[in-house]
Image (cartoon, coloured by chain):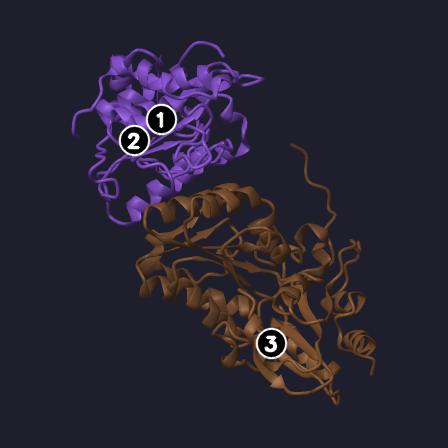
Amino acid sequence: MSAAPDLALAEEAEPRSRPEEDDERLGSPELDQRSRFYSVVPRLLAEDRRLALVLADIGVAYLDEEALAPVEDRVVNVGIREQLMIGVAGGLALAGMRPIVHTFAPFLLERPFEFVKLDLGHQDVGAVLVSAGGSYAWPTGGETHFGHRDVAVLDTLDGWDVHVPGHAAEAEALVRTAAEGDGRAYVRLDLTSNRRSHERALRGRMEAVRHGTHGTVVAVGPMLDRVLAATEGLDLTILYATTVRPFDAAGLRQTLGRPDVAIVEPYLAGTSVARVAEALDDTPHRVRGLGVRREELRRYGTVEEHDAANGLDPAGLAASLRGFFSF
Amino acid sequence: MPPSTAAYDDLPRLLRLMAGDEKHAPIATSTIDVIWVLFNRVLDIDPARPDDPERDRFLLSKGHGPAGYYSVLAARGFLTEDDLRRFGLFDSRLGHHPDRNLVPGAEISSGSLGHGLGLAVGTALGLRMNGRSRPRVVVLVGDGELDEGSNAEAIEFAGREALTNLTCVVVDNASSTHGWPGGIAARFAIAGWATAEVDGHDRRALEDAFSLDHCDGPLAVVARVEDR
């Protein structure tokens, strides 16, 4: 074999662990949702013998081997085999276990979608799916690793709860709640978080963060802080949601003033517009869905640049919301 | 296990109670001996204790042509003859692909190919995690079904995990479009499975194959039947 050519790339500031983990830099568990998940999941397994962790290589490098050691008999890494990952989860559930399944969103829901539909849904067994990477947490990864279609894809199926934490503490609470249940739950971890957690939004109900009369903005998960910034000084009700399925229709109706509603989601724009319409189906209303645009951008760069390109930075949101509410 | 309520010789009559899925009739008859042997001579399954955690599990991955499966379930007391007569009706328990939530004794819902082996791997792992070393997990797949890539994922992984509580029986009716160079058994053997190849209608040979020692890994039984 001849020697490899000397074509080294410019040296990176810090070495990367392994190619499949080349996605995003994790922060501290106090602030970073994904890091918090890795710190809490060994404890969850230790607390509940029903729980099993199913991985497809992603996340393995970030989990603390020492913390996992006491529960390693319930940790399954199937390798880069996402169909099997879901099939194994279904089989574990059939055998009485409660699987927690984790990888990036497109590999968790899109690649093995039929397995999610049949091996979990059609079998009618429970599982907790936990994704990482949000919509474009690894912007240089491009389309193959973008996850903004996840909730829309899952919306075609029956019986899934969907949780979208906006803070590391919310991520832990929602993963814990999902793990303690029996049904099918999806927890969507994002790179971006709000400055503080909102405990009142963790029981499936939306929290009214601000009250107004000119309309309502529903901010989902990590969208809250930027929605608050974009609507500063505007006479609007701001509702905060971390659980979007089931959608808190009662919460929306109870706080509704003028029936103009915008819902700002960190994934595909308009994903929950139909849920808002169902909640208000006996009331003439207007609804606008803001989120990640459908068209493929074919751009890399930074998360902030993708936020701006999708109109999800505070300036973009302010322009969209002011236009919709006619301020 | 309790004896069957009907004999092997009753199976043709039970099969004839079901109408409407004639296009899959050859599949129903190609699998029937394998399933009969499993339910009568191999697996510890009792219709009086369908949820017994210590029961063996049979997973029909090849959900097409389930009439053979249903007739064995009826012979074993999981289904009634009236269930068979209502095969495929709107409010029947028995569709042309089994639904575990409707069919007593069915461990999985199947029909879309390539799902059962992964579910079987998970079930075998789950039993191991629960400390249940006795129950056996047997999954039936077709040779054409092995074309699905999900099976490759499961075969490789089950071998590495040394799932000694797992058996995969491949009913080979030569329906794989491109075939398997080197044979189907070799595909499992290279991944660490013990293997056996038998006549899929020779009930004694099938029983012997399912009884093979495989203490180092899972077992694959290739049951050769008439070509499709």
Q: CA distance from mark 2 to mark 3?
A: 49 Å
In the figure, is residue A215 to the left or right of A174? right
What's the residue type where badge 1 is placed? Leu
Residue under label 1, please give it.
B84
Q: Amino acid at mark 3?
A: Arg
Viewer-side residue, B139 vs B111:
B111
Relative image position of residue A220 (x, y in whole percent): 62, 71
Instruction: Measure the C-alpha gap from mark 1 to mark 3.
Output: 50 Å
Residues packed near mark 2 inside 10 Å, few (<14), some (14 to 19) or many (20 plus): many
The chain letter of the brown chain reads: A
Secondary structure of the residue carrying numbered label 3 = helix
Name the residue nearer the viewer: A312 or B212: A312
**Residue A83, above or below B63:** below
Residue that numbered label 2 is attached to: B79
| Position in image of residue B58 (x %, y %) | 32, 32
Do residues under tags 2 and 3 come within 8 Å of each other at their CB atoms? Answer: no
Mark 3 sits on what residue?
A: A253
Identify the image quadrant of residue A232: bottom right
Give the CA separation, mark 2 to mark 1. Answer: 8 Å
Count of picture labels: 3
Q: Mark 2 or mark 1: which comes first in sequence?
A: 2
Q: Are marks 2 and 1 in contact (CB under 8 Å)?
A: yes
Q: Chain of mark 3?
A: A
Q: Which chain is purple?
A: B
Write the residue at 50% across / 48% down: A56
Q: Residue at x 37, y 47 (%)?
A: A92
